[in-house]
Image: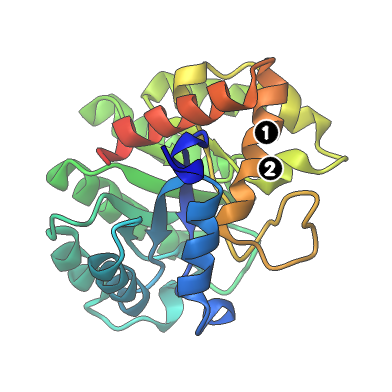
Amino acid sequence: MSDQESLPPLVDTHAHLEDERFRGEVDAIIARAKAVGMVRVLVVGTTPEDSRACLERARLEPLLAPAVGLHPTHLADLPDDAFEQIAALAQDPLVVAIGETGLDDYWKEVPLTAQIPSLRKHLALSRQTGKPIVLHCRDAAIPLMAELEADYQANGPVAGVLHSFCGDLAQAQQALAMGLYLSFSGMITQKGNQALRDIAAQIPQDRLLVETDSPYLAPRPHRGQRNEPAFVRHTCQMLAECLGLAYPEMAQATTNNAKRLFRL
């Protein structure tokens, strides 16, 4: 058995490797991810062009699993047929998830009234394809949870994940009740986020995922640097401490959860 094969397995469930900050370095980034035990990386699209690039890169690198979608803050500058392009890409067997979609009331370029119809289309596409949905939320938990609850009441459990979760315990419990998973990013490692760690400690082990959201949200000890998939091990270590588990046990649990949700 090689050293790499003996490492606890990791899945980074949210990375943006098509970001310009990674240009020309993706092969090296993938190599570093494999060196720490990474078995899959979900590469997440935010526009039709970005989603197509995620899919094409995944055709060449088996470590990668693509998600296709329209990020809520990018909706203003997209072509009229943007969602139709996403729906077509979603039919590809390599695509494992729909998104990233969701709601964002922090950046004000796109009003929530324009984001909600896009979210609803993504939810419908997720159900149509049988592929889970990747959900973004920033300063919009109340309207997002209302939309998800309406979908849940009409159609049953929502297969998907609230990525980079940073809500409160009530929101976490509501999401879990609807069938969603919660993914924690490097934010959980930061000194001022004890409240988030306290919430993570109360999440059932079989609903937890880890992610980088790279190039954003680098965990300690890499805070302030460009994030990358290899750094997800620090988030997994912190999550293990929150739940009182050994790191290998937490890594295996989150990997099993990712494989189950995304059918990896």
Task: In the rendered view, tell whether residue 115 sits above or below residue 108.
Answer: above
Q: Quadrant of residue 77?
A: bottom left
Query: What is the x, y in percent for residue 200?
Result: 65, 25
Residue 114 in sight: yes
- Horizontal placement of 186 versus 71: left or right? right
Q: Which residue appears at 18% of the width and 63% of the height?
A: 87
Query: What is the x, y in percent for residue 140?
Result: 58, 48
Counting the numbered discs, the total is 2
Query: What is the x, y in percent for residue 90?
Result: 19, 59
Q: Which residue appears at 33% of the width and 69% of the height?
A: 54
Residue extending furthest toward the right = 191
Badge 1 crowding class, 10 Å Cα cut-off, few under 14, some 14 to 19, many 20 or more, is some
Query: What is the x, y in percent for residue 22?
Result: 55, 77
Q: Quadrant of residue 238?
A: top right
Q: Amino acid at mark 1?
A: Gln
**Whole-Å distance between the Cαs marked 1 and 2?**
5 Å
Q: Which mark is residue 237?
A: 1
Q: Which mark is residue 136?
A: none
Q: Which residue appears at 28% of the width and 46% of the height?
A: 123
- Horizontal placement of 182 versus 228: left or right? left
- Tell which of 81 and 234 is nearer to you: 234
Residue at disc 1, secondary structure: helix
- Tell which of 146 and 173 is nearer to you: 173
Task: In the rendered view, tell whether residue 219 sits above or below residue 80.
Answer: above
Q: Which residue appears at 60% of the width and 47% of the height?
A: 232
Residue 159 in sight: no
Residue at disc 2, secondary structure: helix
Residues under numbered marks 1 and 2 in contact, where contact means CB atoms less than 8 Å apart: yes
Residue position marked by numbered label 2 in the rendering? 234
